């Protein structure tokens, strides 16, 4: 085997079972790739020794015919997931040196199934961001070259502040970058407002945010409890399906985790879409929307139609309120969820004289600017006199948003097709420095899905005029991820093949 | 709605985040930008609409009354910045 | 009205409402599987959830819900089949999450009422506003160091029921009686052990004063009072403080205060003075708590007889006075002890005699030794036998008192009947033996016997002498009869 990192997860799984490669070889190849890609800043911690030990154990199990579904497959884990004894900080300074004494349910499922952990992936601090620029560990550079940049120019920028290089999106920027740059076969990610789907779209990878409750949130550092959901980023829909099957499932330790069997999502790949009805929501056609986005969207609809699906126009009238409502609900929950970071039991502690001073100094120094901003907004919208006007109203609007989807699904629509992002990837340092809202607008197409708790899958569908990946989003009925995998695979098959970015960073 | 500087200070205090005086005008601007972004929600007709309490139709799972956890003081204290004799330590709190 | 407080400007009425925090009896905590046991090493009864580690989530303990519903039924209250949990946000070192999970907007139990016994004969009603479930906080020790507080999270997350009364009490006495009765109900139901020394029952006391008939005055909340006596004292001093301020032309500021039993005063809690804004909102880690009628009905069916019902039944079935019934029913265990004794062996005994033994000698012994009556060392069967022995004339009441002390002490566990035999304590009913003893005493005290014929009051002295010579075993009635006859007092 020459290029082990170029394998898809499914191909690597087959090669391992065929014994044509070993997990140690596969793991070592990825560790080498990670080492060479340090400049991209995708990983914040590499667990090489542990990875090789796991790989050896996997090889033994493979040899003994006791392989789990993910046996010997090296993965990257978003820094949001608690991994026992390993760096877990949600890329925040406030969790300085924190090493949990426990494992998240999702990652424990992966290890149960034989997967190998390569290390922890960079992300926006506490998953608050759309460009991975809010990470305490610095931004991640996308493996995609900025338009008209030479590899030499880009490589040089890696050693500096990375300005002008492309962001991989966020908050799962490390996950998307690592998967796109072939640093791991697949990665865990998480999605509160688009944090799986937007980075997948920006990097030409596939990501799915499952239905709320499909994956346990136990051991995931919380951002906004009613919106957070775990999911994978991988290079194909099949790989995503394989990952999700292991990640998902009931958990008695999470009261909001759904208790229903996990289907064999992989079996949904390649199913016929004949007779399916796909809704095209008119409210997603924004004023001033880029022509190439609109064209891609139409093209996607044509591909599904060509495969036998019926395309219908649908209306989701409360769509435009989703993003503002999200920016009330998510910060409100965050302001409470992040109250536990107080310098008493773990993480950073800054002296401030008395106890209040300790809290205030610890939290001022431990949280980055974006997190502080959202905590203050969240505190404000919950405070006396504003709670009803902001929080309660936003939750009512959430009910309306969910009702919109229910109405469409009740009318026989199987899934909804939308653009994933308003544009292709932007540059590091390009957005949000003057007005935070500019950055928030990235999530305009994805955030409705979180507000309604629905599953959403993003698959690469083409390239922008500047040669950067663009994705399309499929939104499904609650707990019908299978239909999304079926439809996603059709888009994947129909779209022009993306060429993997050449490793200019190495 | 928009916030004045006194409100910014009050929110920072409630959120237990130290804010330097020179940061206040900037923070005020950012918070007001976000508040103006969400302003349009005031125009939505939400008459008779229940606020969302649970995004998926599910019943609260109930746990039986069995002691299954605890007795892990070492793990509980492992990451603490300052401990003594099994206690977490904080600057003296005056009641 | 007797409850009014006399001030410089006339009479004042004090208005009291209470928020009682009762620790729910359960093995594990409200939202985690850690133990609730008291007195462990610091931070041992703590799970990762209780310590608010990142990514930890609450899962509710159904027994705590059952206890709340049982209590609600005991308070004749509205049970809400759908309730929800909110977060009360504030920063404090013994609050690891930075919020307390509580039921702010929709509690599991709504309005109810308690019949409060001011004296065993005199009752009044206190309305219950609501009962909700919430988490207890940890504990900070402030006396371990000059500069640091020591935080122990063992209590963090233990389930509490907050039981809020309506402002229906008009004196310290009424408030004390209310808490006493509430505690009795909780202990009957078994939803809280009511142990105030361990802090398992404590109260926030809302006090205001007004001129009779005037609208409610501004109230002050006295936090965390942990004994019934202190609740009474706190109300007295707080009411007088408020009256003095108003009579001096001042106004009462709504605030939280602390009762200092050492100084006998309440004082403002300065550290809590900073404007509170708890930012309540529904806990997104939990779903609404829902249960059906079958859940409630099953708990109702299993509910023990409650104190008021038991008291009424004791009066009806045993012919006991309200006073005796109230005392016996104050503790479920004593009431059960009484009934077991009164009905032991399927026989009926004189309930009043049984009650007197329990409330008298047995309680005195138990109190002196800080024991519960039922744990004093005499089984209901033992006491029943003792009462039977008296009834059968086998021993006298006086001997029985000695037998009781033997049974509670050196002869613990012995069969009273066998003990009386073995120790030769059986009452002498043999007329011949009694007459002989009487004769001997008269003969030895001929002068006194002569006097007694004209001074019948001396009979008692003669009875005493005869009892003395018979070692207390002679049937006193027979002795008295024989003496009367022989001294010619008939």
Image (cartoon, rainbow, N blue to C red):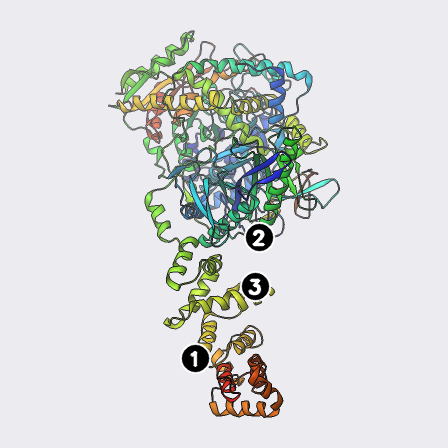
Picture coordinates of residue C411 (x, y %)? Answer: 55, 77
Can see residue A412? Answer: yes
> Which mark is in front, 3 or 2?
3
Q: Are the residues flagged by discs 3 and 2 from a single subunit?
A: yes
Badge 2: residue crowd in 10 Å (few <14, some 14–19, many ≥20):
few
Q: Label for residue C371?
A: 3
Whether C147 is drawn above or below A396: the answer is below
Picture coordinates of residue B17 (x, y %)? Answer: 63, 26
Q: Label for residue C392?
A: 1
Q: Which residue is mark 2?
A: C38
Picture coordinates of residue C55 (x, y %)? Answer: 52, 36
Give the mark nearer the N terminus: 1 vs 3.
3
Subunit ID for the residue under disc 1: C
Residue C313 figure quarter: bottom left
Q: CA distance from mark 1 to mark 3?
A: 30 Å
Left or right of A293 on screen, residue C261: right
Q: Are the residues flagged by discs 2 and 1 from a single subunit?
A: yes
Q: SS class of the residue under badge 1?
A: loop
Foreground of the two, A141 or A219: A219
Foreground of the two, A463 or C92: C92
């Amino acid at each position: 085997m020459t290029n082990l990192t170029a394998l898809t997860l499914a191909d690597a799984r087959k090669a391992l079972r065929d014994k044509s490669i070993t997990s140690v070889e596969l793991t070592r190849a990825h560790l080498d790739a990670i080492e060479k890609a340090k400049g991209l800043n995708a990983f914040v911690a590499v667990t090489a020794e542990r990875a090789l030990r796991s790989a050896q154990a996997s090889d033994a199990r493979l040899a003994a015919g006791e392989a789990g579904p993910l046996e010997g497959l090296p993965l990257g884990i978003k820094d949001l997931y608690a991994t026992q004894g390993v760096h877990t900080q949600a890329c925040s300074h406030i969790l300085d040196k924190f090493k949990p004494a426990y494992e998240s349910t999702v990652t424990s499922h992966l290890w149960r199934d034989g997967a190998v952990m390569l290390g922890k992936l960079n992300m926006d601090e506490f998953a608050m961001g759309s460009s991975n620029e809010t990470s305490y560990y610095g931004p991640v550079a996308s493996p995609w070259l900025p338009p008209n940049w030479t590899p030499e120019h880009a490589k040089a920028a890696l050693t500096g502040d990375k300005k002008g290089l492309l962001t991989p999106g966020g908050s799962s920027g490390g996950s998307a970058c690592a998967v796109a740059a072939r640093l791991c076969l697949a990665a865990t990610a998480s999605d509160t407002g688009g944090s799986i789907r937007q980075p997948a779209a920006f990097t030409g990878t596939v990501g799915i945010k499952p239905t709320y409750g499909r994956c346990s949130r136990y051991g995931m550092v919380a951002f906004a409890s009613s919106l957070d959901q775990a999911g994978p980023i991988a290079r194909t829909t099949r790989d995503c399906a394989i990952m999700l099957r292991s990640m998902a499932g009931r958990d008695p330790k999470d009261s909001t985790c759904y208790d229903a069997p996990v289907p064999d999502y992989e079996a949904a790949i390649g199913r016929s879409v004949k007779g399916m009805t796909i809704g095209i929501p008119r409210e997603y056609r924004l004023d001033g929307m880029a022509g190439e986005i609109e064209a891609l969207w139409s093209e996607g609809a044509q591909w599904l139609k060509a495969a036998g699906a019926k395309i219908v126009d649908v209306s989701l009238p409360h769509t435009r309120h989703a993003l503002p409502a999200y920016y009330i609900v998510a910060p409100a929950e965050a302001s409470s969820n992040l109250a536990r970071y107080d310098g008493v039991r773990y993480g950073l502690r800054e002296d401030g004289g008395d106890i209040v001073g300790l809290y205030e100094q610890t939290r001022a120094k431990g949280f980055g600017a974006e997190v502080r901003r959202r905590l203050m907004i969240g505190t404000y919208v919950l405070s006396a006199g504003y709670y009803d006007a902001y929080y309660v109203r936003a939750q009512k609007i959430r009910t309306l948003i969910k009702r919109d989807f229910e109405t469409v699904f009740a009318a026989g629509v199987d899934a909804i097709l939308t653009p994933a992002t308003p544009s292709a990837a932007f540059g590091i340092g390009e957005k949000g420095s003057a007005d935070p809202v500019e950055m928030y607008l990235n999530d305009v197409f994805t955030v409705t899905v979180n507000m309604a708790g629905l599953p959403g899958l993003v698959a690469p569908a083409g390239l922008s005029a500047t040669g950067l990946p663009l994705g399309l989003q499929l939104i499904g009925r609650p707990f019908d991820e299978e239909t999304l995998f079926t439809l996603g695979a059709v888009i994947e098959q129909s779209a022009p093949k993306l060429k993997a970015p050449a490793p200019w960073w190495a | 709605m928009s916030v004045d500087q006194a409100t910014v200070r009050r929110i920072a205090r409630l959120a237990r985040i130290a804010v330097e005086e020179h940061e206040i005008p900037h923070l005020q601007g950012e918070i007001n930008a976000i508040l103006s972004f969400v302003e349009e929600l005031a125009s939505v007709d939400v008459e008779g609409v229940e606020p969302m309490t649970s995004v998926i139709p599910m019943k609260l799972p109930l746990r039986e009354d069995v002691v299954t956890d605890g007795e892990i003081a070492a793990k509980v204290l492992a990451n603490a910045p300052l401990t003594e004799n099994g206690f977490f330590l904080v600057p003296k709190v005056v009641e | 009205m007797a409850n009014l407080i006399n001030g410089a400007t006339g009479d004042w009425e004090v208005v009291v409402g209470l928020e009682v925090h009762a620790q729910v009896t359960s093995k594990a905590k409200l939202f985690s599987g850690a133990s609730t046991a008291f007195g462990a090493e610091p931070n041992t009864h703590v799970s990762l959830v209780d310590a608010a580690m990142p990514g930890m989530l609450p899962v509710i303990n159904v027994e705590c819900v059952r206890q709340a519903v049982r209590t609600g039924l005991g308070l004749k209250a509205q049970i809400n089949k759908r309730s929800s949990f909110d977060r009360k946000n504030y920063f404090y070192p013994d609050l690891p999450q930075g919020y307390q999970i509580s039921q702010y907007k929709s509690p599991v139990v709504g309005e109810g009422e308690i019949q409060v016994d001011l004296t065993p004969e005199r009752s009044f009603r206190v309305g219950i506003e609501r009962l909700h479930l919430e988490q207890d906080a940890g504990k900070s020790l402030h006396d371990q160091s000059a500069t640091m507080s020591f935080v122990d999270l063992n209590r963090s997350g233990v389930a509490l029921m907050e039981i809020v009364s309506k402002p229906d009490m008009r004196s310290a006495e009424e408030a004390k009686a209310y808490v006493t009765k509430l505690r009795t109900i909780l202990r009957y139901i078994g939803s809280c052990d009511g142990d105030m020394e361990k802090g398992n029952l404590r109260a926030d006391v809302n006090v205001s004063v007004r001129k009779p008939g005037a609208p409610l005055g501004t109230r002050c909340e006295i936090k965390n009072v942990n004994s019934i006596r202190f609740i009474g004292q706190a109300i007295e001093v707080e009411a007088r403080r408020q009256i003095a301020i108003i009579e001096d032309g001042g106004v009462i500021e709504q605030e939280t205060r602390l009762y200092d039993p050492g100084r006998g005063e309440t004082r403002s809690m300065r550290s809590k003075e900073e404007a509170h804004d708890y930012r309540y909102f529904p806990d997104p880690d939990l779903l609404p708590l829902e249960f059906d009628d079958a859940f409630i009905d099953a708990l109702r069916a299993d509910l023990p007889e409650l104190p008021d019902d038991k008291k009424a039944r004791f009066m009806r079935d045993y012919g006991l006075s309200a006073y005796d019934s109230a005392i016996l029913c104050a503790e479920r265990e004593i009431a059960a002890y009484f009934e077991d004794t009164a009905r032991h062996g399927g026989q009926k005994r004189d309930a009043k005699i049984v009650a007197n033994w329990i409330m008298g000698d047995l309680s005195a012994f138990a109190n002196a030794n800080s024991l519960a009556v039922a744990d004093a060392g005499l089984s209901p069967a033992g006491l029943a036998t003792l009462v039977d022995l008296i009834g059968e004339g086998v021993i006298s009441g006086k001997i029985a008192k000695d037998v009781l002390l033997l049974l509670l002490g050196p002869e613990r566990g012995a069969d009273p009947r066998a003990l009386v035999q073995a120790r030769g304590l059986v009452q002498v009913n043999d007329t011949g033996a009694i007459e002989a003893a009487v004769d001997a005493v008269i003969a030895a005290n001929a002068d006194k016997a002569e006097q007694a014929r004209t001074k019948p009051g001396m009979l008692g002295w003669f009875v005493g002498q005869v009892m003395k010579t018979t070692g207390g075993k002679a049937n006193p009635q027979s002795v008295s009869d024989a003496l009367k006859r022989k001294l010619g007092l008939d």
